[in-house]
């Protein structure tokens, strides 16, 4: 596996250009975050290509807790939006996606991705793993256990930072130690909020191509926790097993469950109704895109249905606009309906413009379109 200083995909406030392929990425907007409806083969191939080319690949695995935190924590939500791949880790996320017509076929958990890499990677060229975080002794135990197995993965180092701040965990000696191991894959286990924040904070300093926060996966690898049986996972009952293994988690699951119920009743079901009604009123799903430019901005008017059926046309238009050096203004005055696929594309456009210090403005939204933005969790895109 080739290693080295990876090519950057995003830079927090920096000058590096974002990946131009982002606008062709199939991504869907769901309750304020972006989900990639990818399968295991696609993810593992992305990882292997990133390692071979020494290109950064920031992966997030969004479970219900991620979705809940994304509602009230803009910084955490931004960490998910900055990911190169964000999978649906958690059956509640899959169920919500299906209700909204998003083609997420199955759950893709971080633990499953890790296991797939272990047993599908070529043992003669093992994937080199570095483990950062976990409870005291867990990272080293997971490392030792991985190296005792005959698989396509080898652990080249681990580090236990203790219960310290993100600033303290970002000290030069710690980052230098991580980089010195020339790993291919950085597995972080610090708790979702701290782990995502640490990865974003040190994105440009870490030289390991693939990085992802895996949480309980490291405990599973160390043998400190047993994972739920496959049947419970498929039925969406893994949370019950986790409470059996870690009783203190019941408070989080109870709180997240209440938020899930609230989101279902106040956001998802009304959103389903308004989109279906808008589509019924629209009848045909034609879309006419008008584009012009003035001294300050590139102006795009969407006339018709901004939906998945017209996504190729939208991608071409957004790519042309994003190739310029001006802010982009999108006019929704004559837009009759939009869906999760369009919102996913809009997130990617916003991400690309931010990476170049340019702005995205959405104007003249009809009441029904503004309502879709609100119910979908993307009202923040209207207030840049």
Image (tube, rainbow, N blue to C red):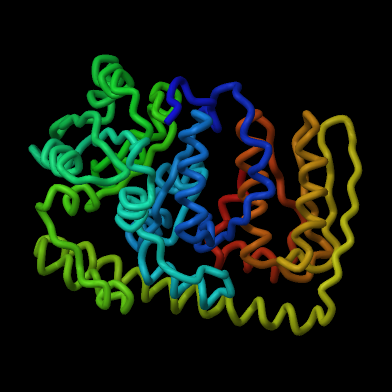
| Viewport quadrant of the C terminus | top right
Residue 44 location (% of width, % of height) = 45, 50
Going by the image, does 41 lie left or right of 287? left
In the foreground, 228 or 10? 228
The image quadrant that residue 252 belongs to is: bottom left
Residue in the image at 30% along x and 21% along y: 175
Task: Return the residue found at the far front.
Answer: 124
**Relative to residue 96, is residue 147 depicted above or below?**
above
Number of numbered tags placed on the structure image: 0
The image quadrant that residue 138 belongs to is: top left
**Relative to residue 240, is residue 202 depicted above or below?**
above
Residue 135 location (% of width, % of height) = 12, 42
**Relative to residue 334, is residue 53 depicted above or below?**
above
Residue in the image at 44% along x and 31% along y: 209
Residue in the image at 55% along x and 67% along y: 375
In the foreground, 306 or 231? 231
In the foreground, 119 or 222? 119
Residue 331 location (% of width, % of height) = 80, 53
Residue in the image at 83% along x and 67% along y: 304
In the foreground, 286 or 373? 286
Going by the image, does 355 lie left or right of 236? right
């Amino acid at each position: 596996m080739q290693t080295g200083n990876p090519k950057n995909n995003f830079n927090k406030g920096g000058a590096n250009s974002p990946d131009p392929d982002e606008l062709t990425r199939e991504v869907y907007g769901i309750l304020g975050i972006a989900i990639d409806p990818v399968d295991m083969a696609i993810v593992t191939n992305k990882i292997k290509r990133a390692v071979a080319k020494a290109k950064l690949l920031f992966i997030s695995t969004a479970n219900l807790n991620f979705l809940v935190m994304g509602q009230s924590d803009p910084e955490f939500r931004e960490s998910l939006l900055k990911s190169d791949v964000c999978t649906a880790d958690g059956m509640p996320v899959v169920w919500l996606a299906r209700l909204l017509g998003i083609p997420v076929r199955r759950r893709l958990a971080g633990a499953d991705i890790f296991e797939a890499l272990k047993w599908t990677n070529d043992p003669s060229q093992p994937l080199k793993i570095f483990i950062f975080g976990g409870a005291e002794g867990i990272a080293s135990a997971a490392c030792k256990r991985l190296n005792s197995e005959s698989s396509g993965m080898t652990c080249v180092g681990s580090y236990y930072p203790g219960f310290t701040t993100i600033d303290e965990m970002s000290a030069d000696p710690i980052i230098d130690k991580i980089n010195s191991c020339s790993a291919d894959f950085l597995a972080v286990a610090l708790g979702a909020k701290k782990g995502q924040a640490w990865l974003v904070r040190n994105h440009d300093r870490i030289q390991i191509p693939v990085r992802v926060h895996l949480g309980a996966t490291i405990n599973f690898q160390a043998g400190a926790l047993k994972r739920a049986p496959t049947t419970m996972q498929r039925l969406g009952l893994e949370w019950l097993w986790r409470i059996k293994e870690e009783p203190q988690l019941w408070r989080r699951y109870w709180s997240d469950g209440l938020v899930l119920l609230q989101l279902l009743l106040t956001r998802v079901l009304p959103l389903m109704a308004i989109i279906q009604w808008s589509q019924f009123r629209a009848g045909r799903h034609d879309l006419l895109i008008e584009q012009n430019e003035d001294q300050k901005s590139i102006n795009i008017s969407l006339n018709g249905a901004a939906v998945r059926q017209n996504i190729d046309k939208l991608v071409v238009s957004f790519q042309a606009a994003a190739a310029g050096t001006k802010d982009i203004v999108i006019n929704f005055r004559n837009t009759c309906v939009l869906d999760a696929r369009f919102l996913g594309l809009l997130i990617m456009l916003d991400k690309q413009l931010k990476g170049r210090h340019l702005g995205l403005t959405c104007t003249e939204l009809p009441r029904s379109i503004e309502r879709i933005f609100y119910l979908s969790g993307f009202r923040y895109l209207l207030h840049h």
